[in-house]
Amino acid sequence: MSFGQGGPSWGPGDSRTPDWAALAEASAARGRRRKWLFIGGGALATAAVAAIVATAVITTDGSGGASGPEKNASELPAPADLPSESAPGPSFSSVAPPPPPDPKDYIADEKKDTSPVTVDAFFPGRKLTMGDRVYAKGATTRTTGCATVTQGALGSILDNNGCDQVIRATYSKDGIAVTVGLAVFGTEAEARKAAQQASGGMASLSGSGVPTFCRGGAVCRRTANSYGRYAYFTVGGYISGKNVTTADRNVYAVGDDLTDFTFRQIRHRGEVQASAAAGAPVT
């Protein structure tokens, strides 16, 4: 048997038996060479990939210097700088603040309405200005005899409902005069009842340049209202004694101005006292 460069060969008619052992050994040798080639190539490929990754890690440092675990670790915040999961959050009081005082509460009952009750407290100054209308202030009075400054049934109505005092003031303009009478009670309910029951009216107040008016049977306009523990009444008409009719809008306008002004003065009294109470320390 002879072997060429490519392995064993037999010619026609060659009756020689192949050396099977030799053939098997040659085949095994070739298999071992291929196996080592595969292993060696894989190792080289792995090494190449590792080198590429290492190069990429190094070159990601834009400063051109070395980078790696040491530098990356130095850029991380220290544990003390990290926010704590148990850090306390903002706290809010569960108790709602008290509501602001209601000004009407301070004029609804004499127990809270403790400011002095005087003529100047309600009708200050020498004149009254309402928009472009200016009224001259006339005479003023204050009395605890409520029934003595009324006409008709109003006196007994005031007394029966517990009237404490009455303040009167007269204002005039262009031959028209109006007296407003402020009756003071202990509670809001008393004042409201007196205004609702009103009959007759407040007696007009002359003096300080205003002659007698709305007396001797002259027809005048009368009003009755209440706010808080105060009932307020007006009587108005012509100084000349002329009777007032529903067509005399100028008389109505003067009376409405005096009524509006009195209401504002009472309300302002409540606002002042409520504001003072809100600023006072809690005891």
Image (cartoon, rainbow, N blue to C red):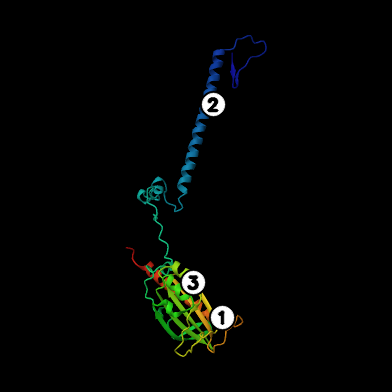
Residue 261 relative to residue 71: left or right: right
Report the mark closest to the observer, 3 or 2.
3
From this view, report whether residue 173 is shown above or below residue 194. Answer: below
**Mark 1: amino acid:** Tyr
The residue indicated by pointer 1 is 252
Rendering coords of residue 73 (x, y %):
39, 47
Q: CA distance from mark 3 to mark 2?
A: 123 Å
The residue indicated by pointer 2 is 34
Task: Name which residue lies at 42% across and 77% down.
Answer: 146
**Mark 2: amino acid:** Arg
- Mark with earlier residue (1, 2): 2
Rendering coords of residue 157 (x, y %):
46, 72
Secondary structure state at the residue bearing disc 1: helix
Q: CA distance from mark 1 to mark 2?
A: 125 Å
Towards the viewer: 27 or 132? 132
Rendering coords of residue 143 (x, y %):
39, 79
